Amino acid sequence: MIEPHDDTRLLYASRLEEAGYAVDSIANGLDALSSAHKRLPDGVFKEMSVPGADGFEILQALRAEPTTADIPAVVVTSLLHFDVPQRARESGATVVLCKPTPIDSVLGAVDELMRATPVDRLARRQLGRCLQTLRKVGMQLTPDASANERVKTLIDRLQIAVMAIDEHGRYVAASTGIE
């Protein structure tokens, strides 16, 4: 979630968490882009007017990267200029709501968006997050090896069948159990 106002960010985060969502709350646009690339969220919930980056630029930057291009985005904004909703959609927003919007309407929009997201997209992002975790752990186990070798070493130690692919769908490594 990208929301510059502390009280609004806290309200949205607490209600989304109560609804079962894991929420990473960020106030700054540049931090949000960095976080999205590192964390691969299943959805983005944002205000258009945030410090550090233009809201339209954030959406466009997310759409420009293969790993974040298909992440659905809900925009809740107080910018009521006549062209903001259209420009937000053109920049990559999936849903645009104008403030003030009742929190139940916001939650309904997020729920609907998550239900409409194809399962394969959610699974691909989940696998991407798992691979990132494996790489981090692998680096701790064998800091002198290449990233792919560290991942291979890590998954070879596992007693289950695991195959790792990179963000482009290319084979990276597989445990001996995969055979």
Image (cartoon, rainbow, N blue to C red):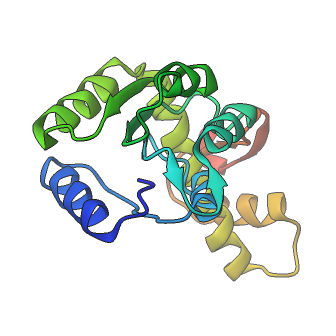
Residue drawn 71% across and 40% down?
Answer: 61
**Farthest residue toward the front?**
81
| Residue situated in front as seen by the camera: 37 or 15 | 15
- Quadrant of residue 92 within the rendered picture: top right
Residue drawn 53% across and 33% down?
Answer: 71
- Quadrant of residue 9 within the rendered picture: bottom left
- Judged left or right of residue 136, residue 49 is left
| Residue situated in front as seen by the camera: 96 or 111 | 96
Q: Is residue 82 above or below residue 58?
A: above
- Residue 67 visible, this orientation: yes
Which percent across, then down, holds residue 55? 58, 44
Which percent across, then down, holds residue 168? 77, 33
Q: Is residue 26 above or below residue 109?
A: below
Q: Is residue 21 above or below residue 67?
A: below
| Residue situated in front as seen by the camera: 70 or 127 | 70
| Residue situated in front as seen by the camera: 70 or 102 | 102
- Judged left or right of residue 166, residue 52 is left
Residue drawn 55% across and 56% down?
Answer: 39
- Residue 179 visible, this orientation: no
- Judged left or right of residue 115, residue 56 is right
> Which part of the image, by quadrant, shows the C terminus?
top right
Which percent across, then down, holds residue 28? 55, 64
- Report how many numbered discs are placed on residues in the image: 0
Residue drawn 12% across and 54% down?
Answer: 18
